[in-house]
Image (cartoon, rainbow, N blue to C red):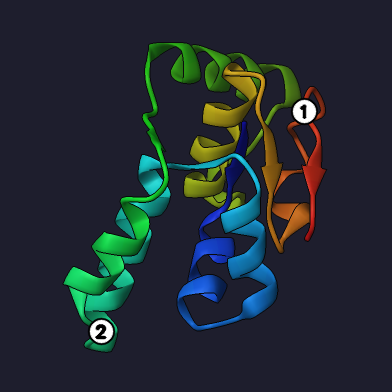
Amino acid sequence: MILCDTNIFIYALQGNKKYLSFLMEEEVCMSALSYVEILVGIEKNNVSQKKVEEFLSLFPIISFDALSANFLVTLIVKEKIILRKSNPIDLLIGATAASKKMDIVTNNIKDFKYFTSIKIKKI
């Protein structure tokens, strides 16, 4: 299973066929954090929440749990990550994937530079 970053779902929701095809053809899931980011984004952009939720319901949602939290704590200490200089949501999404040994697909590979134990790919 591949965990897709928020931007992959956003591009698909905007009608980008490349991203939509990828999501439909691969075994993918999303982080609960991505789900929140998307729903907050549609509230700001006056998009139909029902249509977005119907689309997102096609994908399993993976929670940030104690395993993910422990992975992230270890990574922050080991890499001396300065939280105010990093995107905390990307750290949480990355830890969710890495703790469950899932690769990540994103359009922003640099956002996941600390997660060397898994593959970070672009479509």
Which residue is at the front of the view, 64 or 12? 12
Name the residue rendered at 55%, 23% in the picture: 72
Report the residue that reaches farthest toward the front: 25
Spot the residue most to the bottom: 46
The residue tagged 2 is 47
Q: Nearer the viewer, residue 41 or 4?
A: 4
- Residue under pointer 1: 118
Q: Amino acid at mark 1?
A: Ile
- Residue at point 77%, 54% (across, down): 109
The crowding category of the residue bearing disc 2, from other C-alpha atoms within 10 Å (few below 14, some 14 to 19, many at least 20), is few
Residue 41 is left or right of residue 1, and the answer is: left
The quadrant of the picture occupied by the C terminus is bottom right
The residue tagged with tag 2: helix, strand or loop?
Answer: loop
Q: Which image quadrant is residue 100 in?
A: top right
Q: Say left or right for 50 vs 60.
A: left
First of labels 1, 2 by sequence position: 2
> Marks 1 and 2: which is nearer the front?
2
